[in-house]
């Protein structure tokens, strides 16, 4: 400890920062999937949620219970899952963030692994970064000539001579 300052690892700061309503990346994935399903049917059941996320029903039940505790869901054990207003707002944001990142990755040519890459990236972006990516996506969509220049540049890019670190 130096003076009045106490230093921690990155993970240590994450733990300190956490509060009861903090959503983990896994909880965000659950809430996003619940939102997707509720848009179609108005509700979802644990068995369907577990199937969609490729997890066991017991794992889904545990996470859904946590999301209900912090006010994102209405859920009674063995019943249906519905979003609260708070859950609806967060679910809409999470889906939009996912779609924004996925569209960006497609714009830059990530195709085969786009879902994996999206899942790896989306949870760690600030709201401001997502907003700026969304603006860039719209610009690229509305400027096909720029997108074509990017594709041409990428096709002719020489991977064998990457720039040195720090340049």
Image (spheres, grey):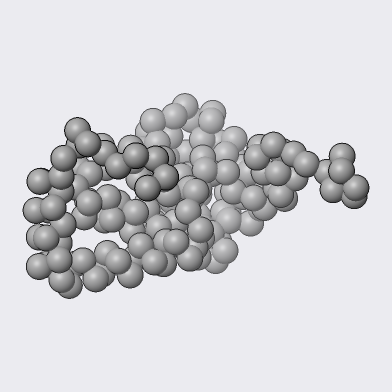
Residue sitting at x 67%, y 52%: 21
Where 137 sits versus 152, above or below?
below
Q: Quadrant of the N terminus?
A: top right
Q: Would residue 44 be seen by someone viewing this image from the given angle?
A: no
Horizontally, is 137 left or right of 13 in the view? left
In this orientation, which residue lies closer to the viewer: 124 or 78?
124
Q: Position of residue 15 (x, y in %)?
A: 71, 41
Where 154 sits versus 116, above or below?
below
Residue sitting at x 48%, y 30%: 57
Horizontally, is 56 left or right of 148 in the view? right
**Residue 94 occupies quadrant:** bottom left
Residue sitting at x 49%, y 48%: 124
Where 78 sits versus 107, above or below?
above
In this orientation, which residue lies closer to the viewer: 17 or 75?
17
Q: Position of residue 25 (x, y in %)?
A: 52, 43
In this orientation, which residue lies closer to the viewer: 62 or 44?
62
Q: Residue furthest right?
A: 3
Residue sitting at x 42%, y 45%: 166
The count of marks equals: 0
Q: Would residue 9 be seen by someone viewing this image from the given angle?
A: yes
In this orientation, which residue lies closer to the viewer: 144 or 99?
144
Where 31 sits versus 159, above or below?
below
Q: Position of residue 132 (x, y in %)?
A: 39, 66
Horizontally, is 14 left or right of 141 in the view? right
Q: Position of residue 9 (x, y in %)?
A: 69, 37
């Amino acid at each position: 400890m130096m003076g009045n300052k106490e230093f921690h690892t990155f993970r240590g700061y994450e733990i300190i920062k956490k509060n009861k309503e903090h959503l983990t990346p896994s909880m965000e994935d659950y809430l996003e999937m619940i939102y997707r399903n509720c848009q179609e049917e108005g509700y979802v059941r644990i068995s369907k949620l577990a199937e969609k996320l490729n997890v066991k029903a017991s794992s889904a039940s545990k996470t859904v219970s946590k999301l209900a505790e912090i006010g994102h869901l209405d859920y009674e054990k063995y019943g249906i899952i519905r979003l609260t207003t708070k859950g609806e707002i967060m679910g809409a944001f999470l889906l939009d963030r996912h779609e924004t990142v996925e569209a960006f990755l497609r714009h830059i040519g990530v195709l085969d692994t786009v879902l994996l890459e999206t899942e790896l990236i989306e949870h760690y972006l600030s709201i401001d970064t997502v907003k700026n990516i969304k603006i860039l996506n719209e610009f690229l969509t509305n400027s096909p000539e720029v997108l074509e220049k990017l594709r041409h540049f990428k096709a002719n890019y020489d991977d064998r001579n990457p720039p040195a670190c720090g340049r």
